[in-house]
Amino acid sequence: MTSETPVNPLRAGMRLHRAPDACAAVVFGATGDLTARKLMPALYNLARERLLPGGFSVVGFARRDWTDEQFRAVMKEAVAKFSREPLQEELWDSFARGLHYVSSTFNDPAGYARLGERLNAQDDAHGSAGNRLFYLATPPDAYATIAQNLGAAQLAQPRPGSWTRLVVEKPYGRDLPSARKLDAAIGEVFRERYIYRIDHYLGKETVQNIMVFRFGNGIFEPVWNRRYVDSVQVSVGETVGVEGRGGYYEESGGLRDMVQNHLMQVLALVAMEPVASFGGDAVRDEKAKVFHAIKPIDDIDRDTVRAQYVAGAILGEMVPGYREEEGVAPDSRTETYTALRLEVENWRWSGVPFYLRVGKRLPKRATEVAITFKTAPLQLFRQMGGDNPTPNLLVLRIQPDEGISLRFGAKVPGTRSDVRPVNMDFRYGSSFGVDPPEAYERLLLDAMLGDSTLFTRWDGVEASWELLTPVLDAWADGASPLKQYEAGSWGPDAARELMERDGREWHRM
Amino acid sequence: MASNVTPIERLDDRPIGISPAAIEAEFTRLWRETAEPGVDDSSVRLRTMNFVAVGPETWTVERFERVMESLPQRHPCRGVLAVTSPDRTKLEASISALCWRTTTGGRHVCSEEVVLKAGPNDQLALASSVLALLVTELPLNVWVVGPIDLESHLASELIDSAEIVFVDTADATDITVTLQSVLSARRKHDVAVCDLAWRRLAGWRALVAQFFDGQAGVERLSDLQSIEITGGAGISSEMLLLAGWFISCLGLSLAEAERDASSISATLYDRSRGVTVKLSGSGEPAARVTEIKVRAAGGEFVVQSHAESAHMHVREEWPDRFDHRTVDQVATDDASVFAEALDDASDLPIFLDAARGALSLLLASSQLS
């Protein structure tokens, strides 16, 4: 649809070569936390920065019996609290004129009929021409119901010359069978090309910079393979516990909550082949190839670690153990720490292990990719009485303190040939000094533009579940028994042992 | 300019010897001092470009200093200001470190600034000093401040090595001569030229372009009837560049034009269909654009802003509906304009086309009126 849109000659040379068509965004779950914290601030900032089209409007859809005015008032409060830029009254008033609300449960056909009437009225008032962006900011168990009700109410089918798109939040299923069931239900109503599955990690500037770093520079790609890379680590450390979301976390755990989506996406960006262009499905095609090339984990006891934190100290303060958190069962078996050893079996990466780890209540909040290179083929400086050089290490820091560092050996001044590791360090904060847009701003704009590059495609989601569902099943059967680690530590001994078996160690974040 | 860092603090500003070696030695001393334990053990000197401003001392110093108060946070640089004044009898130099603390990581980051002030007889010495002070491996961006003289000894020496030459056609005393000079420099030196006046129009252009987005929008272009651009006193370069942008992007050909002290009216043709263009000064003191009104396909689209307002107002009127909204004004201070232009230079060819369009309108209206 978007590729058929004729070119506006006045856009030549502008940063935004295309602008979204006038459209209405329908937010299901409009009274929820995600809408307040992320979606509405993102839309407000897009409007503020002149990136939304004229004729843009929002319809909130949720069960609470609110009026348009109540919806606007609550959203105003949310934007004032959570927007990265302060709320400006005049801009808010202008933006809020386009906010509307429909009260309904998600399974009431009458609610969808009212939504249709409201959208038609929006088209007349704002010229949005039947373009609709449906956003599912609801609990996942409502996804299929909403999609099917949209279909039944004839709202999913675009009018001639217009478009409808569906944005779905994670989690997309809780294992392979449930993901397939969900996809089948949504697929009855929306074709794959109109489904935009959000993984907000892909909207982060530093995650997108992995592609820029690899494919926008000439010097890294030639060494980005099994000949030069020893191993890759993708790590996410959080200092927080479950933050009042014990009930949710009990149902997910670290593997479902982080590994299946965020870490696998980062892994794919690190491992994928170069693309010929960023158009269409090129990036998603290459990522899917990576997912399909990952070798199934045949020894789950050896190559996976799961653990749960017990009471300890974080940042100088005592914190309770996971089982003492609100909403968590006292005999919970949910993992708060996960480590995996994966292998990407293709020409580029065969034999290079990819280690993934994610943990709550670790000493530091950090997300990073650490790429360890092989040492020089000849240990020349050891022979000359110098130190054995430590391997080159490239660290892509995704958050916080976003940046890139490269460790290499340098001669210590003096008459001996001593070698000491030193770092070249790039920091976004120092070099650019601007607040990057929130991930949701980029992703919402891309969804309105019809650019699905930064959204996950079903074949990638399915392949990821195909890899990890056997792990979940084996864990349920008692494989790789649940370990414990003290809050404030770097995880269980088993994670260290997983690396030691390969003669390696985790990079200290 | 949105930023996650503390304001810039000027650490040193003292007169020093004028030779490049002496200046580099002073910087070395300054960095050693800031790195002493107890003073600040985490200072980082950061430079990603050479940023050189040249011009007459009266025009240039204050404007350059204002830019250096925030530009280094987005584009850390070695800033060199080279100015001349008829009152000076010798070359003088001073250096400063411009430091700020990032909120992420809390590091103390510093850029550096050299100011060289010369008299009328010091042109050669000034040029040689500036060239010697450029950091070799970094790109050079040159700002020719004030009335545009791209053929002075210093400017032409620098332009040949520059990535981008910045000018501000709003400073022009004669817009026709200035636009001709800019286009000629582009041809002669094969260098990218960026006009700050053009970049200040970015918000206007983006909003006007929205009216012609999508299938329906592009169809409107074939039924474009009129364009009215209103600004402050007289006809400014910004108004002319906007008109030139329409002319070049839409491939309009000029049929007739007339001009008086505060307006230009023209009829242009898109194949056989006439489009009227009117530029008028509203009498407001600031020479900035205040309104663009476009009529097409039975609708009217208006963008308005005022010098004192931080916002822009957009109004769309159709026989059956009316829509209006308010958005943020694009920051038009020099530092923000530089920062944006250095981030994204993809519209430089569009500027040249717009300048040609503006020039054709100016020349036609002068000849015909």
Image (tube, coloured by chain):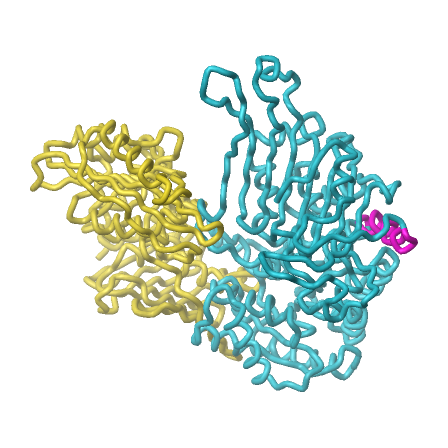
B305 and B252: which one is in front?
A: B305
In the image: residue A298, left or right of residue B169: right
Seen from this angle, which residue lies furthest right? A477
Main secondary-structure element of the magenta-colored stretch: helix
Residue A211 image-quadrant placement: top right
B30 and A174: which one is in front?
A: B30
Image location (x, y in percent) of residue A93: 47, 77
* Quadrant of image for the C terminus of chain A: top right
Image location (x, y in percent) of residue B57: 16, 45
* Residue B254 in view here: no
Per the image, is A302 magenta? no
In the image: residue A427, left or right of residue A368: left
| Identity of the residue drawn at 55% across and 53% down | A7
Per the image, is A472 magenta? yes
Question: Which chain corresponds to the colour yellow?
Answer: B
| Identity of the residue drawn at 31% across and 63% down | B289
- Number of labels in the image equals 0
Region rendered in magenta: A463-478
| Identity of the residue drawn at 17% across and 29% down | B125
* Residue B170 in view here: yes
* Quadrant of image for the N terminus of chain A: bottom right
In the image: residue B318, left or right of residue B179: right
A362 and B168: which one is in front?
A: A362
Image location (x, y in percent) of residue A78: 55, 74
Question: Which chain corresponds to the colour cyan?
Answer: A
A152 w.r.t. B11: above or below:
below
